[in-house]
Image (cartoon, rainbow, N blue to C red):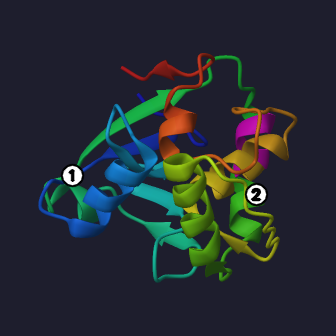
Amino acid sequence: MPKPGDIVFYVDNPDNLIEDAIVLFSKAKHKIVHVALWVAEDKTMEANFGELVGYATISQYTHKGNKHIIKSLPSLTDAQRQGILDYAHSKFGQRYDLPEDIKIGLEDTFGIHIPYTEVHRKICSTLVWDAYEAVGIKLYPEHDCSPEDLFDCPALVLDN
């Protein structure tokens, strides 16, 4: 059973052009296109394209045909789990960082580094990365990571 602070990974819906572009440009072998933090039954915290950081439901994705996979870090304490959610909640209302999304896509596709840092906006993967980093855990070596990069983190295990 998922616990607060676990990570929800969404798999590409082949009928969604934006998700298809994410898979194409990020060379996503698992076709992971979005990531969020589990809060409670059918409730997540996320940064989503065109929206402010806030709550969402898993069902709003699954009814559109997306599948989801939940992974957890077994060593997380209750205090760390709460810290992850507290950090994400402190970012509610921040705008989505479209330039960061484009930057990661260009870097993944063409291998060029683009210097860009915006600390007041989030994309889904940087919200999750920052929330874990706020409690002392680095899921991926670089802040600029994709949902697919987080999915490949060897410390995360599938939640049953």
Q: Is residue 141 visible?
A: yes
| Dominant SS type (magenta) | helix
* Amino acid type, residue under disc 1 in the picture: Asn
Tag 1 residue: 66
Residue 97: x and y, percent? 62, 75
Which residue shows up at 26% across the image and 65% down it? 60
Dot 1, how many residues are within 10 Å of its Cα: few (below 14), some (14-19), or many (20+)? some
| 155, above or below 134, in the image | above
* Amino acid type, residue under disc 2 in the picture: Asp
Q: Return the residue nearer the eye: 92 or 79.
A: 92
Which residue shows up at 32% across the image and 60% down it? 21
Tag 2 residue: 86
Residue 138: x and y, percent? 78, 33
Residue 17: x and y, percent? 22, 67
Q: Return the residue nearer the eye: 45 or 82.
A: 45
| 48, above or below 38, in the image | below
* In-image side of 92 versus 46 (left or right): right
Rounded to the nearest angstrom, the CA distance separating label 2 from label 1 is 27 Å
User: In the image, which residues are magenta?
Assistant: 79-84
Which residue shows up at 63% across the image and 46% down it? 145
The reply to whether callout 2 and callout 1 are in contact (CB within 8 Å) is no
Mark 1 secondary-structure assignment: loop
Q: Nearer the viewer, mark 2 or mark 1?
A: 1
Q: Which mark is residue 97?
A: none
For the C terminus, the image quarter is top left
Mark 2 secondary-structure assignment: helix
Q: Is residue 159 magenta?
A: no
Mark nearer the N terminus (2 vs 1): 1
* In-image side of 144 versus 63 (left or right): right
Q: Quadrant of residue 29?
A: top left
For the N terminus, the image quarter is top left
Residue 121: x and y, percent? 71, 75
